[in-house]
Image (spheres, rainbow, N blue to C red):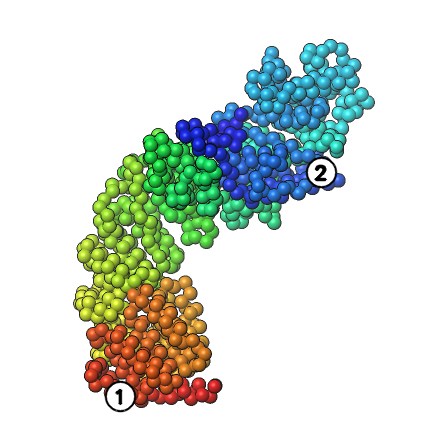
Amino acid sequence: MPLVLGGVVGGRDLRALFGSNDRGIHVEEHFTNRQEQWEAVTGALLDHLSTVRAPDFDVEDLEAPRDNVLVFHGVGGIGKSTLSRKVEAALAHSEHRPAQWGAPGWAGPRVLPVRIDLARSAGTDFERVVLTLRLALAELGRPLPAFDLALRRYWDHVHPGEPLEEFLRRGGLGRRFGKAVPQQMQSALADIAQALLLPGTVGAVVGQVTGALVRALRDRRASVRALAGCARLADLLEAEPDLDALAYSTHLLAWELARVPTAKAVVPVILLDTFEDVGDRVHRDLERLLQRVVWLMPNAFFVITGRSRLQWADEALHGQLDWTGPTAWPGLAAPDGPPAANAGPGPHGERQILVGDFSAEDCDDYLARRLTRDGRPVIGPDVRAVITARSHGLPLHLDLAVQRFLAVRRTGRHPRPADLDLDFPALIVRTLRDLTPDERHVLRSVSLLDNFDVALASRTAGMTYESAALRLVERPFVRSDPHAEWPYHLHGVIRSTLRTAGDRADDRWSARDWTHAAARAFEAIGERWADTSARHRSRLVTCLRQGLRLARDFDLELGWLAEAAWSYVGDSVWEPLDPPAPAEPDPPAPAEPGPPALRTAADALVETLSALARRQHEHRERTVARLGAVVESGLLPPELRDMAVYYRAKAQRDLGRSADSRRGMRLVAEGGGRLAPAARRGLAHLARLAGDFPTALRTADTLGWAGRHHRILGDVWWVHGDMARAAAAYEAARDEAEQHAVAGERATAQAHRAFTLAFTDPAVAHDELDLAHQLLVGLDLRATRLTAHIAALVRDAGGAAAGIEDRARVLRAEADVAGITAARPAVELALGFHHAVLADRDRLDASLARLRDLVRGDAYAYYGDIVCFMAGRPLPADRPSGTRWLDGPDTTRARWQALVTARRTLRSGTA
C-alpha cells in the first residue's frame, strides 16, 4: 500500500484521527479545488482516445512522436500525490469524483486507471512497475500470450527457484490484484505448447516453448499465425532476459492490448506518482527504463506527478535516455515563458503543468472542513486566517498546522492565532531531501533575497561556478517572473521556513554563516546598482528594497545604500520600499534580536525612505512624527540626516506649521549639503506663503535647477494674476525636469501649468490637464494629483452643471485625510473664482469665511485678498493680510478682475 502525505489513506487522516481523545471531532481528508488539473487530465485523455481510435494509428510505429504523457509538477507538499489518488479514484468510479469536477466527456474504450507510487519508501522497483501493469490488465479476463511468455522467461532466468506466484503473494500484489495473472500465464503457455505440439507441463518446458516458438515464427508456421503479427516478438524472445529486455517487452503488452476485441477494449491510464524518487539527474537508469515503457506503449496514457518538469524533450540528454528532444516529445518541450500555475494544456500541446498553490479561499475551506464537530468547523476563523496567511497556499503547511492545532488542544486549552503563527521545520526536511549539498547551500543563500538571477545566486552563495544555481532554478519551489528585474524567487512558505524555522539538518547554518551570506548578497546587489550600463529606476528600486532589508536585518554598514537613497529621492516617484518587519526566528538565528525600532543606521534609513514613500498615503502628521524620530535618533550620517530634516520641514509646511518648517529649512540650507538648494527653495516657498513676494522672487533668481527656480517663479506670478508669465515659467520647469529625467518634478510642473491656464482658457487647460494626468501615471504624488483636480475645478468655473460644489467637498475631504492643508485654501480659491464669475454673493461670502477659518498665522492670508480682487470688493480693514505685492495691490486686482470678466464673457457666449 503506498505511503501518502500526512498519513491520509482511503479518505481518512489517520494521524489527525489518532491526535485527540475527543471522539466528537470528525476528522476527514478534504480535497479542495484542483478542478483545472482535472480538466487538463480529461482534455488530454480525450485527445489520446481520439489518437488511438484513428484508422492510421499503429501501436508498432516506433518513430512517431509521443503525446501520451501528462506531467503535473510542483513543490513538495503542494498536493500532487493527493491529486494523483483523486484522479485514479475519479477515473475508476464516478461516485468517487469530487463534486466540483465535471463528468468526463468521452465514449468508446473503457478507461482503466493504474496508480504506481514510485516513492523510495514504497519500495517500488522496475520489476514491480511491470508486474503491476500486467496484474492490472488481468481484469481483461484473457491471457496476453506474447507478453506473458516474455515475462515468464525473464522471471525464470532472473529469479531461478522462486515461483512468480509466491513473489506476488509475499509482496502484496496478489492481494491487490487477485490471483488471475498466474492462471492466465499458465493458460497462455499451455496454449502455445499445444499449438507447437510440445509435450510436458508448462513449468518444465518454458525454455523449450520459447525456442520452439522462435523457430516457428522464423519459419512462419501457420500454427503460430496469431503471434506472427508481432514483428519484434522473435527478437525479444532471443534477447538476454535482463531488465533492458523486460522494459522492451512492454511493447508486447501494448501489442496485446491492441488485439483485444472492441467490446472488451480498455485504455490504461497509468499514474506514476513521486517521480522525483526514480533517481537524480546524473543517474537516470530507472528513469530510462520508465521512459522506455511510455514510448513503447503509445496506446496507454501516462499521468506523471513529481517535483520537477520532465526533461525528456531536452536533446542534451541524448545517450542518457533513449528518446529525447522536442520532436520526440512535443508536449514536454519547455515553453518560451515560465509555466503558469494551474494552467492546462495550451494551444501548442503543453503537457507539463505546474500545480499551483491554493487560493486563500481554498485554504480556509480546507481548514474549515478538515476538523468538524456536528458539522461545524473546530478551527475558528481567526486561527484559519493566520494559518492561511502563513501557508502561502501550500497544502502541506495546512496539514502540519492541523497537527499543531491538535497538539495545542492536548495541553488543555483551545489554540489561539498566535499558536499557529509559525513555520514548520518539517518543510525544510521535505525541501532539502533531494537536493545536492551545493544546491542546499545556494537555496539557503537565496532565501535572503526577494528575487535573483543565476549569477546573483552564485555570488551570494560565494561560489565561483554557477552549476548548482542553474540546477536549483529548475526546481518547482523556485518561481519565475519574466517581468521582474531578476526573474527568480523562492516559494513564499519555503523562504519563510528556511529563514525562521529551526533548521535541524546536518548541514544547517550558524548565525555567522547567515551573516556572511548576507554580506555577500549586499555587496553583490551593490555591484548591480553600481553598473551604470544597466542603471534605471526599476533596478534602483529592486536594489534598494533588498539592500535595505539585508542591512537592517544583519546590522550591515550603509555603504552603497546612501548613494542609492539619494537617487531614489531625486526622481520624486516614491515607489513603496518598506521591507517586511524583521523575522523572529528560533535559534540559531541569523541576527540577535535587539530593541525595537531605530537601532542602527540601516533602521533609520529604512524608516526615512518608508516615511517619504508612505507620506503619499498617510496624514502629514504621521510623516512629521516618523521623520522626527529619525532625526532625534542621531543614527544617520549628516547628509542623510539632512534628508529627514528637509522632508519633515516640507510636511510641516503642508500642515501649515510655517515656523517649524522655516527652522528646518534654514538648518538644511545653512548646512550646505545636497539638499541646501532645495531648502533655499523651501524658504522661498515659505516667503511666498507669507505674502513676502519680493523675497521669494529674489531667492528664486539664485536657485538654479537644483532649487527648481522656474517653478518658484511660476508660483509667484500666478498669484499676481499674471497667468501668461506663470504658465511660461511652469513650462520651462517641466522642460528642464524632462532634460534631467526627473519624472516627479516634470509631472508637478505640468499640473501647476494646467492650474494656471485653467484661469485663462478652459479649452487649453483641458489639454494641459490630460498631459498632466499622463505624466502622473506610475507616480505616487498625492499633492500633485490634488493640484490637478483643483485645476479642473477652475477650468469648469462659471458653468451651471459642473457639480463644482460637490467636487469641492470631495477634495476638501481628500486634503484633510492626507494632511495636505495647503490644498484647502486652493480649493476655496477655486470656488471663489466660480462664485465671482456667477456673481453669487452669498456663496462668495461663504468661501471667504472658510478661507479666514483656514488661515493660521501669515500663511495663505493673501488668498482672501485675491477672492476680494475677483469680486471687486474692498479688502477687510480689520484683518489686513500684510501681503507685499510686486506691482502693488491695484495692478494685481485689475488682473484678477479681468480674468473673472473674461470667464463671464466666455460663459455667456456658450449659454
| Residue shown at 56% from the left, 20% from the top | 172
Residue 108, numbered label: 2
Q: Earlier in the sequence, mark 2 or mark 1?
A: 2
| Residue shown at 34% from the left, 81% from the top | 843
562 in relation to 460, above or below: below
- Side (left or right) of 138 relative to 818: right
- Residue 881 position by quadrant: bottom left
Mark 1 packing: few (<14 Cα in 10 Å), some, or many (20+)?
few
| Observer-nearest of 311 and 420 | 420
SS at mark 2 in the image: loop
Residue 412, numbered label: none
Mark 1 highlights which residue?
874
The amino acid type of the residue labelled 1 equals Pro
| Residue shown at 30% from the left, 46% from the top | 582
203 in relation to 366, above or below: above
The amino acid type of the residue labelled 2 equals Gly
Whole-percent x, y for residue 628 in the image: 21, 59
| Residue shown at 44% from the left, 49% from the top | 487
- Residue 263 position by quadrant: top right
69 in relation to 599, above or below: above
- Residue 230 position by quadrant: top right
